[in-house]
Image (cartoon, rainbow, N blue to C red):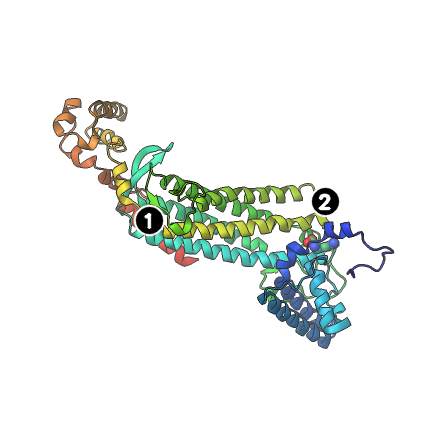
Amino acid sequence: MTKLWGGAFDKETDREVEVFTASIGLDERLWEVDIQGSIAHARMLGNQGIIGKSDASLIIEGLNGVKGDIQASLEKGVSPFDPKAEDIHSEIEKFLTQKIGAVAGRLHTARSRNDQVVTDVRLYLRAEIEKLDYELKGFQAWILKKAETSTEVVLPGLTHTQHAQPVSLAHHLLAYFWMFSRDRSRLADLKKRVNKMPLGSAALAGTPFPLDRNQTSTELGFSEPTENSLDAVSDRDFVIEYLSAASIIMMHLSRWADELILWSTPEFGFVKLDDSVTTGSSIMPQKKNPDVAELVRGKVGRVYGALMGALTLMKALPLSYHRDMQEDKTFLFEGVDTTLSSVRLMHLILRTAAFRTERMASSLKSDFSNATDLADFLVTQGMPFREAHEVSGRTVKFCVQNKKGIEDLSLKELQSIHPLYTEKVIELVKHVSVMNARKSEGGTGTAAVLEQIKKAEAGLSYN
Ligand code: ARG
């Protein structure tokens, strides 16, 4: 295998070393951004007179040709890449040489694979962040639409997995909308730091050639060139930041996945997952298992693992580039693939799910999630909250003894417990009233939820 760097070597590389050090199996997905970066670099070299204009044109034409060849091959389902190659950068350069001959050798002027690879990864990740953001936005749009039609659907809100106070389905779903909002704002923020252009840093120290780094940066759609060459070739913060944001996204998805798993049990029965997103058992014919949701929950481990891997990889590495950094792609690609597919699959599960609102309603019966409102009522009658809490507690005890819900009590029964109870209580302890009473901004009452939906809509249309 011809190397990019064989000049000073007397011996062939040991085959096992070649296999161990190769990254082609992993970084081949960078082929297109590698070509994109090379085209911008070649154009700038030509414009600056560092290489001849006609050589630059030949190289750019050649690179476009290589791009077409790779595309055609991939469309046929054949990998054009030699599995024995060292990495995608040497592979593309080999293709270019095959196409245009020795002039291809001028492309690597004032460039090192150290600034090349980090440029590739930044270009790749920028596009992946946009893809992920697009998926999250689509998911949010679904949540919003579903919320608009479920502001009156009441279900038990839980704390400690115990019935706490009734909430609307809209309010419940919207909680995830805001999680995704924060996720998207984290992505937008880290994208700013991804979007800087390292080319021109060369191996580590910059280059004597009179480059125009701004030109390359503009052509590649970066906001600006990186500020320090040593930092630029060895900075992988943006990989770690992405994996950190992705870990939080996965954590959010896992919370929802777990909730759906719970909600789809016969005991809850709040949701029926569609056949197209459940799988059966090889022995138990009745089973329709929530495997996709379970796998989303399980795959969180991959992304957390990738984050830990990337952090560990970079720990204590002195300046500047080290081959260790080649491993960053294992972690990054694992994170990118897992997160994108998990978001897509969770969206699919939810948009095909049937929400069983009658089960939500029936689960509220006699659940005492209206007990707080009894106490709140007594407070409006002048009783201190602590005493009201005690009276409401006694009312619950009365109900348990008489196998009733608070909403089943007659005025007579209520007044036998405390004379301050009035006719008003009968209406007020209905679960829908309890929900609607929570009108505070950000609360579950329909009026407040409609306001929340307005805010969500505005937020969604801005970005
Ligand atoms: N495949 C390498 C990587 O991903 C490219 C850079 C190689 N540079 C070097 N000095 N050996 O990091």
Q: Is residue 356 left or right of residue 194?
A: left
Residue visible at 54% across and 52% down in the picture: 337
Identify the residue under disc 2.
Answer: 318
Residue 241 position within the rendered picture, expressed as x and y whole percent measured from the top left: 57, 47
Element type where label 1 sits in the image: strand
Q: Position of residue 23 (x, y in %)?
A: 69, 54
The number of numbered badges drawn on the structure is: 2
Amino acid marked by disc 2: Pro
Type of amino acid at the residue the image marks with label 1: Ala
Q: Give the quarter of the image for residue 399.
A: top left
Say which mark, if any, is on residue 354.
1
Residue that sits furthest to the right in the current view: 10
Tell me the element at label 2: loop
Quadrant containing the N terminus in the rendered view: bottom right
- Who comes first in sequence, dot 1 or dot 2? 2
Instruction: Find residue 454 and report its horizontal and vertical position in percent.
Output: 33, 53
- Which residue in the rendered view is the most extreme toward the bottom? 54
Regarding residue 67, the answer to whether it shows in the image is: yes
Q: Position of residue 247 (x, y in %)?
A: 52, 44
* Horizontal side, residue 458 vs residue 329: left or right: left
Numbered mark located on residue 30 in the image:
none
Split into quadrants, the picture shows ligand 1 in the one at bottom right
